[in-house]
Amino acid sequence: MIQVIRKELTIRNKLGLHARAAAKIVQTSNQFQSNIRIIKNGREADAKSMLDILTLSCPRGTRIELLAEGKDAAEALTALAVLFDNKFGEE
Amino acid sequence: MPPGNARVVLQGIGVAPGIAIGKAYRVDRNKVSLVYYYLPSPDQTKREKERFHTAVDKAEADLKELRTKIAGELPEHAHIIDTHIHILRDRMLYDETIRIIDEQEINAEWALRQALENAQQIFAKIDDDYIRSRFSDVDFVAERVLQNLTGQNKQSVAGIRERVIVVAQDLSPADTIQLQVEKTLAIVTDMGGKTSHTAIITRSLDIPTVVGLENVYQAVRSGELMVVDGHAGKVIIDPDEELLNYYYERQYQFERYRKEVVRCAELPAETEDGYIIRIQANIELLEEVVAVIDNGAEGVGLYRTEYLYLNLDQPPTEETLFWDYREVAEIIYPEMLTIRTLDLGADKLATKSRGLGETNPALGLRSIRLCLQEDEAFRTQLRAILRVSGITKNIKVMFPMISGVGELRAARAVLEEVKQSLRQESIEFDENLQVGIMIEVPSAVAVADLLAREVDFFSIGTNDLVQYALAIDRANENVAHLYEPLHPAILRMIKQAADAGRQAGISVSLCGELAGEPLYIPIILGFELDSLSMNPLAVPRVKQIIRHASLEESKVCLNEVLQFTTAGEINDYLCDLAWRRFREDFELFEDEMGKLPAASGTGQ
């Protein structure tokens, strides 16, 4: 069954979504089949593209929305939320 | 001023020391030239996409190989290559190229070039400087694929055949990593700064380097003779004979001094009047142990243990810690290994306190406080340390950030409990294990006499002591200039702690950057410490300076300095002292003094 799930998050790590954080998002997203997007002020980025995420330009404090669409959408968002919560293992 | 003349003299930022004289070799970072053609049939389109796949696969294989190579040599730079590998398969570059080949029926080179230009336009619009500058990574990756597609081998730093001075507009970390050390006399670039990746890498490879020269790439022709002074940040193009001879002489003296210093590195640091002080090393990683031994350090005075805790979902296991500590201890043996227990903020330790969101973490739940509050990780670490001590017998343990006797007793109580449980399990440990503390909180200095009665040694940690005593966060650029290790308050605090330790009959060590700063050595000796612990690379020169010093004289100098009112005065005094009394140890490093305010170059 195809699920569509959304989740709002705030970027809390010091450097924001820079190269290393983006790489981790891609790594995690690639473990799932779902189509996953990061949405900021109406602009969307593919959570499986590091460059797309980078160009969204999200410094600390940015509010974003994660949107996953697919069979494993719920698991994907749970995994990503942990990553965001852990500030991508920084600091 | 040096004698003689040259066609061009450029001033940049010296980031890795040493003097090199040789021929320039310009590394051309111009793009490979590309042709454009239509694909006449769908069959060709399919083949073109396969050609692109192959080129990307090859680029990925090359990058992975490079990554394996540097994981051993430069582990801290491996993530740069990881980023490149990610970009290689990124939708914006990869899928987009395939799409363009299909849609426009054109060759892969041209399609990739278009995808790259599209990406460039997207990046150019970004406000954030850091992210905008990341386009250089995308560009670098695309260039690699283009080279594979065209079969054109761009002039690469890996292909250099004779010993040359590499001249470039900019070198990417990947370029720098590929430099063949034995073929590169020096590196000079237009771009870059002291903390750029290129600088960090060349320092670790020990290649004289000057960056930020702005127009050296334009100014020099390949094959032209040039001089690079990595101390002074100077680059001289086509010098006349007089100037060249001056630099040959300087190079000779510098090499001789370096050789002499390294040759004597194994010997103890004994002053002219027979005072011996142990010179030890600070390390953070197992891999650094080699440098400890190579540079003649007499054991490890500070092993920072935080590294194994970073980026983990759970604290490391006792076994992981045990084997790490044991390996370091065995390599260092018979010298001593001083292990500092966990000195992390709550945000970095994977426990329930994570993410407290403290507004002032430097004054928050961290270090020994965190260990006492969430003592499970602390007990695991102490068990690992104690078990190693039973096998190698060359371990000391040290608690960080102790602010008073109560905290010390609490930490020792946990240690005793862990010992007791080991006894019950009949697991051996060193019953004579020495226990010490870092003196780095001002309150610990004030009660140093009380603390000294209850420990085996002090280690004065100057980096944190300066921050806490002067209320300066050195990472905060608004106040970083007020971070003054020579502030009279700091010197007085070190003296108070050192005296308290000596009176109680325990050993006292000084670690932190202050301990390894050559200029400060003549007065540091005056504290009559038992040991200094520093970056391993600083050890040979510090030992050499100590051999030219005398304890009696240092005590007099220290007493004099302790009467001064400002850090600036003390600094001037030290520059003057270095020039007057230790000229042979400092004259080759003039710029070290030149960059200090009001340094006296003439002496008295």
Image: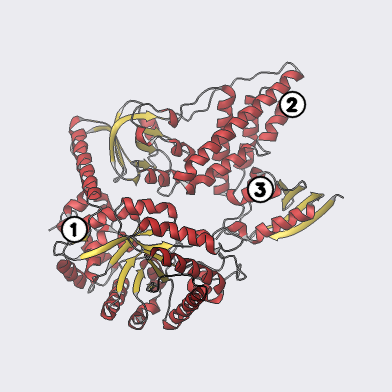
Q: The residue under label 3 is which amino acid type?
A: Gln
Residue at numbered disc 1: B547
Residue at numbered disc 2: B102
Q: Which residue is drawn at 61% across and 28% down?
A: B55
In primary-sequence order, the first of circles 1 and 2 is: 2
Q: Residue B599 appears in which quarter of the rendering?
A: bottom left
Chain under numbered label 3: A
Give whichever of A25, B393 is nearer the camera: B393
Q: The residue under label 1 is which amino acid type?
A: Arg
Q: Are there few (<14), some (14-19), or many (20+) residues within 10 Å of tag 1?
A: some
Q: Are there few (<14), some (14-19), or many (20+) residues within 10 Å of tag 3?
A: some
Q: Residue B315 appears in which quarter of the rendering?
A: bottom right
Dividing the image into 4 quarters, which one contains the C terminus of chain B? bottom left
User: Is A43 drawn above or below residue B553 in the view shown?
Assistant: above
Q: The residue under label 2 is which amino acid type?
A: Asp
Q: Position of residue B472 (x, y in %)?
A: 42, 68
Q: Which residue is drawn at 68% across and 31% down?
A: B97
Residue at numbered disc 3: A27
